[in-house]
Amino acid sequence: MNLISVENISKSYGIKTLFKDICFGIEEGQKIALIGVNGCGKSSLLKILANSRDDNSNIVKRKSLRVSFLEQSLKFNKNDSIIQHILKADTELVSTIREYKECCAENETHTKHFSELSHNMEQLNAWEYESRISSILTQLKIHNLNQKMKTLSGGMLKKVAMAQVLLEESDILILDEPTNHLDINTIQWLEKQLVKSKKTIIMVTHDRYFLDKICNTIFEIDQANLIQYKGNYSYYLEKKAEQSEIDDRREGKIQGLMRLELQWMRKQPQARATKQKARQQQFYRILNRDKPETENDMSIGVAGRRLGKNILNLKKISKQYGENILINSFSYSFSKQNKIGIIGTNGSGKTTLLKIITEQIEADSGTVERGINTHFGYFDQNSSFEDQDQTILNYIKETGQYITLHDGSNLSASQLLERFLFPKSSFNTKISDLSGGEKRRLDLIHILLQNPNFLIFDEPTNDFDIKTLAVLENFLMLFSGCLLVASHDRFFMDRVCDSLFILNEHGGIDLYHGNYTDYLDYQNEKKELELKLKPNSQNQNKTTSKTIKAKTKLSYKEQQEYKKIEDDIEKLETKSKKYETVFSTESYASDKYQEAIKTQQEIQDTLTQKWERWEYLSQFDT
């Protein structure tokens, strides 16, 4: 059943056209991801769909259609409590629950009005709805429902907004960046809720694992057009790759034809017969044709400053606020090409750790020793520009004229802007006219042009579109310096990090060798093992104890294997990195590229086996 039909809608800001005369329909049960670069109009389109009136002839909605809209920025009365905010919906059901709670709070449980409300609660099946409210809030770990909205953190505000949207009696959920500011546990919980939901969904998100698992349709805004793909994100990537190959072949044929036509035009024949005039017209048609947009070169490996022997040493640093211990006596010495992700729940101390390292705040105890040649590039959660009337190009040129790549060649400031998806036509745009995501992208280029050799990122993915993330990921994979990044984006962390700092609730920080998905798999396997080992009876407990005691020490052969396995892992990782240059220099269709993919997969499979074996051997005495 068709819920919304859209015919020829357009949106512009000043001279910039976001989308023009786009048409599409939204069917019942569809789960749609809306993708495109920052500033292409994704959020604008969501707002049009959420707020369009019934008298808008270009948008036809099914009668009595109910829409819930989660905006990026939550609007709320700062003096409302959590429960007051959640019960803001203007429906008979929610109004009845709201009045009922107010009567209970004012001890008016013996009045005639309270009896009427109780009856209405029964008639509207409001008790079940109230139970749903309690269940969802508990799962989101929202316990104090009387807490004022103004006292909540960004992550908690997002949870409250999400709870409100999920609880509303609606047919369509419109979600603008639903995973921003949520920790991984909440993201996974939300993922499960949306997968099993029967509601129609249209969302904007940069979290590729999230949208791939949930969405069955992709809408892409590209060059003011809307293109539809019937499938998930993986399917979309396949179709884009196929289309790119077709465009390349077509463009190659056109280029060949143009060369022939150009030779003919240069001869400038004396006779101007009808046939010859037709050839001239054909030439100009080809010359002025709409050319397919070519993807920017995604490999931007930077040579960077050389790191010294001593890079960064953290020695027994601790930090707490009141009774809340965030970091408890943590020590770590960074080595060259460390690429480490930081994960933990909201409020666990990720940003605090980064600010201690960059000396924005002081640790309560311990020392931070930065090497003399270590130059930080810190991309935090906020971007600020002193002069918003500056143009994009002038702002960047003030920072630096060029950046040196890993192959020794130079990339100018304007070329770097193009690599990070700023077309030449935008170079004279004022900073004040940029979208939030475009400003963040500009701030990132500003930091990279300073040529740091130790990059630090605090939630870098929140304001970036998928294309920008792909460029950034490829940049970081080729980056020769150190990287420390705090993020909840599993896809991003999987691509750029090879180790993790795990922050726990007691202030401890554990080091895990592997990426985000490896860690989550490890945690799941650990839980399954704990369940298997959990004794069902006293006899089973004794049996388990005997089994555990049966092996406490490695055999001589296993000890030799354990001594050698770390060297094997290091050699495999070094070998794996060599193939990154193949991916950046060869085309997808080349034999070298395909052979590199095959070999790289074999290396990764061997590495996985080696790490699993290392984890097993390391738990015994040598």
Image (cartoon, rainbow, N blue to C red):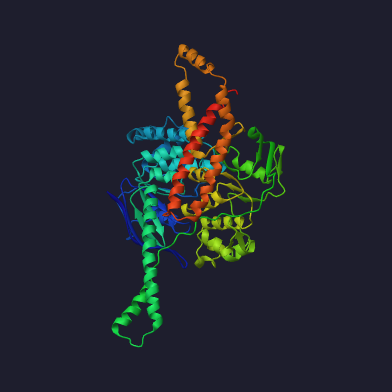
Residue at 53% over, 27% down: 616
Residue at 65% over, 32% down: 323
Q: Tell whether 513 sits left or right of 310.
A: left
Q: Is residue 63 above or below residue 615?
A: below
Image location of residue 260, percent across then percent down:
37, 74
Image location of residue 404, percent across then percent down:
61, 59
The quarter holding residue 564 reads: top right
Observer-nearest of 544 and 97: 544
Image location of residue 407, percent across then percent down:
58, 57
Q: Is residue 44 above or below residue 335?
A: below
So how many labels did they put on this image? 0
Q: Tell whether 11 sits left or right of 439.
A: left
Q: Is residue 245 above or below residue 518?
A: below
The quarter holding residue 199 reads: top left
Observer-nearest of 470 and 22: 470
The residue furthest top is: 539
Residue at 38% over, 35% down: 129
Image location of residue 599, percent across then percent down:
46, 44
- Locate the C terminus by quadrant: top right
The answer to whether residue 359 shows anywhere in this view is yes
The residue furthest left is: 1
The answer to whether residue 177 shows anywhere in this view is no
Observer-nearest of 165 and 113: 165
Observer-nearest of 347 and 585: 585
